[in-house]
Image: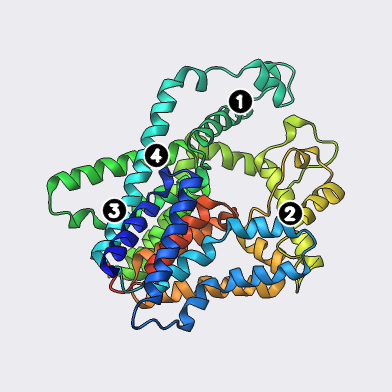
Amino acid sequence: MNKKLRKIFIALTLLIAAFPILTFGTRSVVTFLWAILGIYLFVNHKNNRLGKDVLLLIFPFLILCITLFYSKNLNYGISLLVKMVSFLIFPLVFYLNRNSFSKKLISYVIYTFIFSVLILIFYQAISVFINFDTLFQNITPSEIKSNGFKSIEEISKTKLDQIKLRRFRNFIIEKSNTHTTYQGLWISFSLFILGLNIKNFKKNSFKLFAMISIIILIVWFYLISARMPLMAFLVTISLTVFIFSKLPKRKKILLLLSIPLAFSVLLLFKNPISTRFKEYYTNGLSIPHQKFESDRFNSSNVRNGVYFCDFQIIKENFFMGVGVGDIQDELNNCYSNKIGAKVYTWRDYNSHNQYAFFWISAGFIGFVGFIVFIVNIFIKSIRTVNIRLFYVICSSSIVFISENVLERSDGVVFFFFFIALLYYNKGLKAT
């Protein structure tokens, strides 16, 4: 009986790995069934001992739960923790079933994920092709008005490029129900795995498929303009080679120096990434204020305002934080009382920094707990020569600087599914 249940458990694991093409509802149901079955298999196993190792990955989540005791907005806090429950489920269940996954099976899980990412890209590409004329037409009167202008003559060429890029990105997000940042994370991991293993494919047909897949992933990566995941990809690839490869030190140093060179070349040409970096260069550290008109708001100065409020709240609640339930209320109060720009009334802006999120929510202890959590995974990946684990933790840690990856299902499922899968399973040295 247990053998049949174990096969079902593995099948559900493969299904969860296809989460990029699953609806949120389907994803939740499958994960719930998978978790219940995984716990049942552990309880009915002869050597069912629960060690302390699992606490290493769930400790930051437990700290957030404790902050509910001094949060005023319990409803928001509980709803946020429910969104982040993968923080608890994946480490626990993978730990309990850590002897169920062979190296070959883990490869199947990872390639299931990659295949689902490719399916998602094909779906979006077809949607773009069908709506090509609408997506790439000249700016419309409604777009002119919504951006605070009276006529197209008032809009600079740079602003026009920004509006068109936003139109394309919003279309992609609406079609896939996934933000481009998370797609960027998925694509970068897929590219890394395919690049790492392409030489090991024995059949030429597999190598050809891998090469075509890499080209498709790179093109889509560029088109969706996922800047931080792209930066994380380049930095992590270089660090992976520097730490794990047997290249001479001189070549390793040259590889590290190639990162700023690659970015410099990229910025010389007109593209979605150079457009955004020019925006940051123009705005500097300026933040919006009450007298700003709609046309003066952009992603860079709005983010500057968010980081200003992050720092203010951390400074005022250094040791204990405000509690996970009150983080958004405190941010909104800061936007209203200390900045006053109307852009922050259009929607809720989170901390846009995962490290700041833990510090604001749970104070200095929460921040340190999260840092210890990350450092522990880094050390484990290097000691065990677990290159895949190193890539996930390194690339994600870089994206954490600009995004609250763990507050959304697309981010928290990706991060903890692969972190827990690779952390608690041995024999994963690069082939």
Amino acid on which the number 1 mark rests in the picture:
Leu
Residue located at (56% from left, 33% from top): 170
Labels 1 and 2 touching (C-beta < 8 A): no
Amino acid on which the number 3 mark rests in the picture:
Gly
Amino acid on which the number 2 mark rests in the picture:
Gln
Residue beneath disc 4? 120
Name the outermost residue toward the front.
1
What is the crowding at mark 1: few (fewer than 14 residues within 10 Å), some, or many (at least 20)? some
* Quadrant, the C terminus: bottom left
Q: SS for tag 1?
A: helix
Residue beneath disc 3? 195
In front: label 3 or label 2: 2
The residue nearer to you, when weighing 281 against 373, is 373
Left or right position of 282 against 417: right
Residue located at (47% from left, 17% from top): 133
Q: Earlier in the sequence, mark 4 or mark 3?
A: 4
Residue beneath disc 1? 160
Q: Position of residue 354 (x, y in %)?
A: 61, 60
